[in-house]
Amino acid sequence: MSNYSVTNIGPLDSWRNHYGGFVPETTRDGRRVVDHELNTDIIGFTATSYEPGEEAGYWHSHDELEEVYVFLEGKGQMGLDGDVVDVSPGSVVHVGTGVMRTWRCTPDSPTNLKWLCIRAGQIPLPAIPDDAVPIRDIPMPWSD
């Protein structure tokens, strides 16, 4: 059996219909813990959709995990320690260990704020992935 897994999180406009979370206190509409649907070991991610004016309602930090937030739609803000950072489509925010964080969709956002949060830890990544070797003599699998 190959070591891969596949799921489908659907189009952006369907994200709000999902109800999920890690624990009951943070489970809500518009949150999907995608790595629970995949066979990941050291990478995790969530897909989230907040309505205008909705906020996390809590702060948190991690001792061992880094997070990268990739914003896809809407207008929002992240609280990062003592700073407030505006986010919109194309914003990518890295949050290291020990940084307190929270987020919200601003009340004036034209759409829901939608983002992916990617979590990783345990081992440092090399600057250039050095565990792969291109194999060029195998035909491509598609038949156009």
Image (cartoon, rainbow, N blue to C red):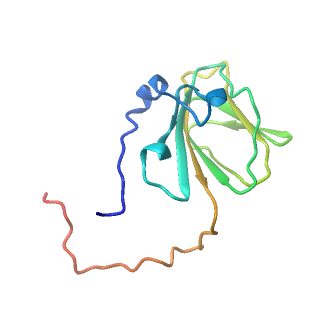
In the picture shown, does residue 35 fall above or below 130?
A: above
Residue 127 appears at what percent x and percent y? 59, 73
Quadrant the N terminus occupies: bottom left
From the viewer's perspective, tell me whether residue 76 is left or right of residue 115. right
Residue 122 appears at what percent x and percent y? 64, 64
- Residue lying furthest right in this view? 82
Q: Residue at x 60, y 51 (%)?
A: 119
In the picture shown, does residue 135 fall above or below 14?
A: below
Q: Residue at x 73, y 35 (%)?
A: 102
Q: Residue at x 62, y 33 (%)?
A: 23
From the viewer's perspective, tell me whether residue 72 is left or right of residue 66. left
Quadrant the C terminus occupies: bottom left
Residue 124 appears at what percent x and percent y? 64, 69
Q: Quadrant of residue 28?
A: top right
Q: Residue at x 40, y 37 (%)?
A: 9
Toward the viewer: 119 or 140?
Answer: 119
How many labels were placed on the picture?
0
Toward the viewer: 47 or 43?
Answer: 43
Residue 4 appears at what percent x and percent y? 36, 58
Q: Quadrant of residue 141?
A: bottom left
